[in-house]
Amino acid sequence: MIFGFIGVGRMGGGLARNLIKAGKEVLV
């Protein structure tokens, strides 16, 4: 379960980064 949780965390982090990048592009 721990490894699965880490995998989900990585995926969530990637999605968050993509959203932040998209937000920055929109703001700029």
Image (cartoon, grey):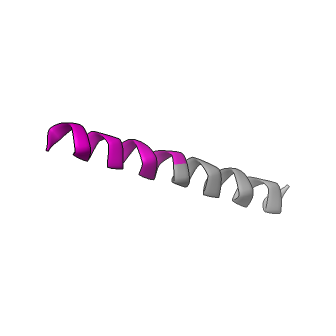
- Residue 20: x, y in percent? 34, 47
**For the image shown, how many numbered marks are present on the structure?**
0
In this rendering, position of residue 26 left or right of residue 6: left
Q: Is residue 24 magenta?
A: yes
Image point (53%, 54%), residue name: 13
| Quadrant of image for the N terminus | bottom right
Q: Is residue 6 left or right of residue 15?
A: right
Residue 1 in the image: above or below residue 16: below
> Horizontal and vertical percent for residue 2?
80, 60
Give yes or no for residue 23 being in the magenta stretch: yes
Q: Which quarter of the picture shows residue 27?
A: top left
Q: Position of residue 21 (x, y in %)?
A: 34, 49
In which quadrant is the C terminus drawn? Answer: top left
Q: Main secondary structure of the magenta part?
A: helix
Q: Which residues are magenta?
A: 15-28
Going by the image, does 18 lie left or right of 28? Answer: right
Q: Quadrant of residue 7?
A: bottom right
The residue closer to the viewer here, 2 or 23, is 23
